C-alpha cells in the first residue's frame, strides 16, 4: 500500500487474517487510520451457507457471526497498524466480548459496514469498540478484546 492508500482489497485482507471461505467475513476495507479505527464491508448474500438452516423460510444472519465479522475487522486493524508487514505478525484471538447488543436483523442483500475503534493497546492485547451498521442504522455493537497468540 502507498502511504496515502487507506483501503484494503480482499487479497490484502487474506494476508492479514487466517480465515478462509466460508468463515472469512470481511470483504473490503474502505478506510482506516492505523492504531485508531477501521471501516470495512461485509456483503450479505443468500448464498451464505448458514442461511440454509438459519432460517430457511426467513433468512437471518446469526448475531454471533456479526460479532465474528467485527472481531475479524478488529484483527485487520491490528495487522494493518503493525510496523512490519502483516504477514509477519502473530495471530490474535478474541478473548472477551462485553455489552453485546443486537438492535435489528440482518438479511440477504444487506451490506454491513463494520466500524471498529481501538480504545487501547496494552502489551499483546487490544480493546476495541465495535459497531455493525446497515443503511445508516446500528444493527449490533459490542466491546471486544483481542490477544496476541502467545
Image: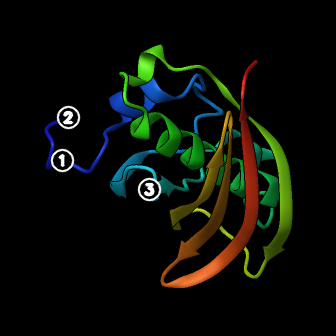
User: Which residue is at a point 54% across and 63% down the rendered structure image?
Assistant: 117
Q: Is residue 30 left or right of residue 24?
A: left
Contact check, label 1 and label 2, Cβ < 8 Å: yes
- Measured as percent of width and height from the top left, residue 68 is found at 71, 47
Which residue lies under the disc numbered 2?
Answer: 1
- Measured as percent of width and height from the top left, residue 147 is found at 73, 35
Q: Nearer the viewer, residue 47 or 135?
A: 135
User: Which residue is at a point 56% across and 74% down the rendered structure image?
Assistant: 133
Residue 40 - label: 3
For disc 2, the neighbor class at 10 Å (few under 14, some 14 to 19, many from 20) is few
Rounded to the nearest angstrom, the CA distance separating label 1 from label 2 is: 6 Å
Residue 47 in view: no
User: Which residue is at a point 53% across and 68% down the rendered structure image?
Assistant: 110
Residue 138 in view: yes
- Measured as percent of width and height from the top left, residue 41 is found at 45, 56
Q: Which of marks 3 and 2 is in front?
A: 2
For disc 1, the neighbor class at 10 Å (few under 14, some 14 to 19, many from 20) is few
Looking at the image, is 111 positioned above or below residue 42?
below
Looking at the image, is 48 positioned above or below residue 22?
below
For disc 3, the neighbor class at 10 Å (few under 14, some 14 to 19, many from 20) is many
Q: In this view, does 147 lie to the left or right of 111?
A: right
**Residue closest to the far top:** 88
Which residue lies under the disc numbered 1?
Answer: 5
- Measured as percent of width and height from the top left, residue 49 is found at 70, 39
Q: Which of 69 and 55 is in front in this view?
A: 69
Helix, strand, or loop for circle 2?
Answer: loop
Of callouts 3 and 2, the N-terminal one: 2
User: Which residue is at a point 73% across and 80% down the rendered structure image?
Assistant: 104
Amino acid at each position: 500500500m502507498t502511504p496515502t492508500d487507506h483501503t484494503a482489497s480482499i487479497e490484502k485482507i487474506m494476508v492479514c487474517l487466517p480465515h478462509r471461505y466460508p468463515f472469512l467475513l470481511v470483504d473490503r476495507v474502505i478506510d482506516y487510520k492505523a492504531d485508531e479505527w477501521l471501516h470495512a464491508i461485509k456483503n450479505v448474500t443468500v448464498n451464505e451457507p448458514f442461511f440454509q438452516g438459519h432460517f430457511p423460510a426467513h433468512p437471518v444472519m446469526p448475531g454471533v457471526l456479526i460479532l465474528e465479522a467485527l472481531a475479524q475487522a478488529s484483527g485487520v486493524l491490528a495487522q494493518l497498524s503493525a510496523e512490519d508487514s502483516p504477514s509477519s505478525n502473530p495471530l490474535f484471538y478474541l478473548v472477551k466480548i462485553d455489552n453485546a447488543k443486537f438492535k435489528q436483523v440482518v438479511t440477504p442483500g444487506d451490506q454491513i459496514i463494520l466500524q471498529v475503534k481501538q480504545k487501547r493497546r496494552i502489551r499483546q492485547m487490544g480493546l476495541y469498540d465495535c459497531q455493525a451498521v446497515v443503511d445508516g442504522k446500528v444493527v449490533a455493537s459490542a466491546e471486544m478484546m483481542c490477544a496476541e497468540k502467545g
